[in-house]
Amino acid sequence: MSFPLMRTLIEEARRISMGGNKMRRRRIFGIASFAILAAVVMISYPVSASWVLIAEGYGVTSVSPSGCSAAVDGYVRNPASSGDDVTALYHVSWSDTRTSGQRATHYFNITVSYSQTAPELYKERREPTDPGGGGNAILNITIYGVQSGWTINVIWRAWVNAPSQCYAEDWDSKTITIR
């Protein structure tokens, strides 16, 4: 209800109170009271939380005739405020460019430690590849309603193992404090 409408209702109530029907006066005062209550409730209602991408990681593993490699890079993206829902992403890709050999295993993991959750939250992806294989995916973890002053630690991990040929691993981590 807008303030000009409330003002009109209150002015009408005053006019009626100067001499008018008691029943009509009560109804106008009731409507004005309701309008004031509605305005107070709307003003005091907290602003709703928003969704925030707080951290994003990129992981790549590969197997080639010359060996294995793994690389992980993590980044803090946006600050979060109390009450926000926050997400950490992990973009992963894997490849095997050999022409022959045993099956290789590519492993990716995102772990989120939040000072108010126990145990840690994690998601993982394990991809076996034959020579010539590969792919990509996105892993994500969302925490709802974070609180000011608490911290979130995100760890991204990647490793690849080609039995009897090579092994490689890498990881990165970031810590975010909720404001």
Image: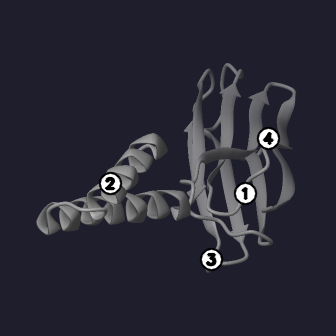
Say which mark, if any, is on residue 45: none
Distance between mark 3 and mark 1 Cα atoms: 17 Å
First-in-chain label (4 vs 2): 2
Q: Nearer the viewer, mark 1 or mark 4?
A: 1
Say which mark, if any, is on residue 81: 1
Q: Position of residue 83 (x, y in %)?
A: 62, 62
Distance between mark 4 and mark 2 Cα atoms: 59 Å
Disc 2 on helix, strand or loop? helix
Q: Residue at x 12, y 66 (%)?
A: 23
Q: Please name whichever residue, 34 or 110, is drawn nearer the observer in this view of the structure.
A: 34
Q: Please name whichever residue, 98 or 6, is drawn nearer the observer in this view of the structure.
A: 6
Distance between mark 1 and mark 4 Cα atoms: 13 Å
Q: Please name whichever residue, 99 or 141, is drawn nearer the observer in this view of the structure.
A: 141
Q: Is residue 54 left or right of residue 73?
A: left
Quarter of the C terminus within the rendering: bottom right
Q: Amino acid at mark 4?
A: Arg
Proximity of marks 4 and 2: CB atoms separated by less than 8 Å:
no
Proximity of marks 1 and 2: CB atoms separated by less than 8 Å:
no
Q: Amino acid at mark 2?
A: Arg
Q: Amino acid at mark 1?
A: Ser
Q: Position of residue 39 (x, y in %)?
A: 45, 57
User: Which residue is labeled 2 in the image?
Assistant: 15
Proximity of marks 3 and 4: CB atoms separated by less than 8 Å:
no
Q: Nearer the viewer, mark 2 or mark 3?
A: 2
Q: Residue at x 54, y 64 (%)?
A: 44
User: Which residue is labeled 4 in the image?
Assistant: 77
Proximity of marks 2 and 3: CB atoms separated by less than 8 Å:
no
Say which mark, if any, is on residue 117: 3
Q: Amino acid at mark 3?
A: Thr
First-in-chain label (3 vs 4): 4
First-in-chain label (3 vs 1): 1
